Amino acid sequence: MTSHSPGVWRNWSGTADARAVRFWRPRDTDEVQRAVRWAARHGLRVRAVGGGHSFTDCAATDGVLLNLDRLAAVETVEPQADGTALVTVGAGIRLRALGAALAARGLAMANLGDIDHQSIAGAISTGTHGTGLRVGGLASQVTGLRLVTADGEVCEADAVRDPALFEAARLGLGALGVLVAVTLRAVPAFTLRAREEVYDLDEALDALEGPDGWVATTDHVDMFWFPFTRRALVKRNDRVDPADGVPGLSPVRRWLEDELLSNGVFELTNRLAAAAPRMVPAVNAVAARLLSDRTYAAPSADVFVSPRRVVFREMEYAVPRAALRDVVAEVDRWLRRTREPVPFPVEIRFAAPDDVWLSTAYSRETAYVAVHQYHRLPHARYFDAVEAIMGGVDGRPHWGKLHGLGVERLSALYPRLADVRDVRARVDPTARFANVYTDRVLGPVA
Ligand SMILES: Cc1cc2nc3c(=O)[nH]c(=O)nc-3n(C[C@H](O)[C@H](O)[C@H](O)COP(=O)(O)OP(=O)(O)OC[C@H]3O[C@@H](n4cnc5c(N)ncnc54)[C@H](O)[C@@H]3O)c2cc1C
């Protein structure tokens, strides 16, 4: 095991850091077991970290920090009669490498978020999701797990073998053990036609709704609204047959729009906003005017994922879909009243109800509202205000994004949180996998 000790670890957005007594990069399951047992002998807590792309301190520890980048192999691929395949991978595999491995086998993830730097274990452990009413978040695509539990033993969990542990650990904030392998249901590779169009915000909110609305009729809808403007960019992605002949994007256009405008120029407008916060409404008006329509087709992962190089902080709440319009209106009112300098767009996505115990979309049709702030501008006032608005409609916070809720309120919002606590008390009675974040959101081990 490579050891960097003591090591300072910092997350992508700079909102969490930790000084671990040991920082290890185990090569296999055996080394993960040895690390957990070593920590137990020394009375230390253990956390695993993936890509460090969570905004919360969920991966932080002052004990033993394990990075599973080396557990990244594709173990097995089992084709199923319906064309899907059950794919077992090392839990540390990054989503980009997973996507490439699946594509090489004619497969793909059914849905993805908007980046692919995360590890599969980190992504499912915090409830990472994409958008689309026909498909749930990444954890809902998991059919089995292998984890190292607090006693250092290896445990397999799925719908048959310890189903309660499976339900808790497939979105378990790292609190049930160290995931070493994940089995996912992959789907046959597919092509998406992306339609990106600029609309008036109210027109777009109207068009989302109803049985013939975009949310119901589109596979994946993603919307970005620039504060202080009425302009929204709506991305509608639908599965198409590659033979339909929808043209792809030329590499030059992709670079120009996704790198230069969405990252290079966007970084500059954000720097301008940080230097002159009062200019933000004007800056946003210009940024929103730079948005333009485009339609193209590409393999699914190339449509879902885009480069996000401008560093930001994020809070995201899952609200009942019916509440979307009201919460957007309230956020808009608050921003206009306070003139809080926010150069980043608000993002709106959707998800089907699912049955994953700690899923933000557990048992309810969901709209996601994500607010972002440039890392050189203060985010606390904005995020506190948004959190209060979301609280009024029983919004559930994304586990990997900034929020201020504790176990009491979360227990009311997540009806199966008590079940997760029960499983945790059984498999980790000494709180080996606890940290400051799990103490806050799951409470002490009962
Ligand atoms: C630019 C950016 C874009 C994003 N886009 C989206 C998006 O589109 N949709 C969305 O839902 N989220 C999104 N996120 C949030 C992100 O997907 C989650 O925070 C995710 O957890 C990050 O994965 P990671 O591998 O970096 O995990 P980390 O942040 O490293 O860890 C997350 C949690 O998983 C635990 N963990 C990690 N590995 C293991 C393991 N092997 N066993 C047990 N526990 C483990 C950690 O202890 C921690 O609690 C985005 C984040 C950023 C920075």
Image (spheres, rainbow, N blue to C red):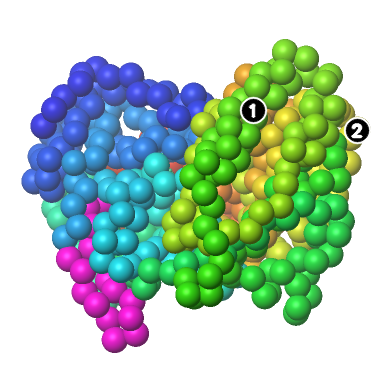
Main SS of residues in magenta: strand
Question: Callout 1, which amino acid?
Answer: Val
Q: What stretch is highlighted in magenta?
A: 76-91
Q: Residue 391 carries which label?
A: none
Question: For the point 84% across and 29% down, which residue is it?
Answer: 281
Indicate which disc, 2 or 1, sits on the residue closer to the N terminus: 1
Question: For the point 16% across and 24% down, which residue is it?
Answer: 3
Task: Give residue 352's quadrant in the image.
Answer: bottom right
| Residue 348 shown in magenta | no
Question: For the point 69% across and 69% down, which residue is it?
Answer: 215
Give the Cα distance between marks 2 and 1. 28 Å
| Residue 89 shown in magenta | yes
Mark 2 sits on what residue? 337
Residue 318 in percent (x, y) is at 63, 55
Tag nearer the camera, 2 or 1: 1
Q: What element carries label 2?
A: helix
Left or right, 25 with respect to 17, comes to: left
Q: How crowded is mark 2: few (under 14 residues within 10 Å), some or many (20 or more)?
A: few
Left or right, 3 with respect to 199, comes to: left
Left or right, 399 with respect to 166, comes to: right
Question: Callout 2, which amino acid?
Answer: Arg
Residue 81 in percent (x, y) is at 29, 86
Residue 344 in percent (x, y) is at 69, 34
Q: Can residue 212 be seen in this view?
A: yes
293, 39: nearer the viewer: 293
Mark 1 sits on what residue? 265
Q: Is residue 43 visible?
A: no
Name the quadrant where ligand 1 sits: top left
User: Does any atom of ligand 1 lie closer than 8 Å to the CB of label 2?
Assistant: no
Q: Is mark 1 on a helix, strand or loop?
A: helix
Query: Where 143 falls versus 138 (above or below)?
Result: below
Residue 317 in percent (x, y) is at 64, 50
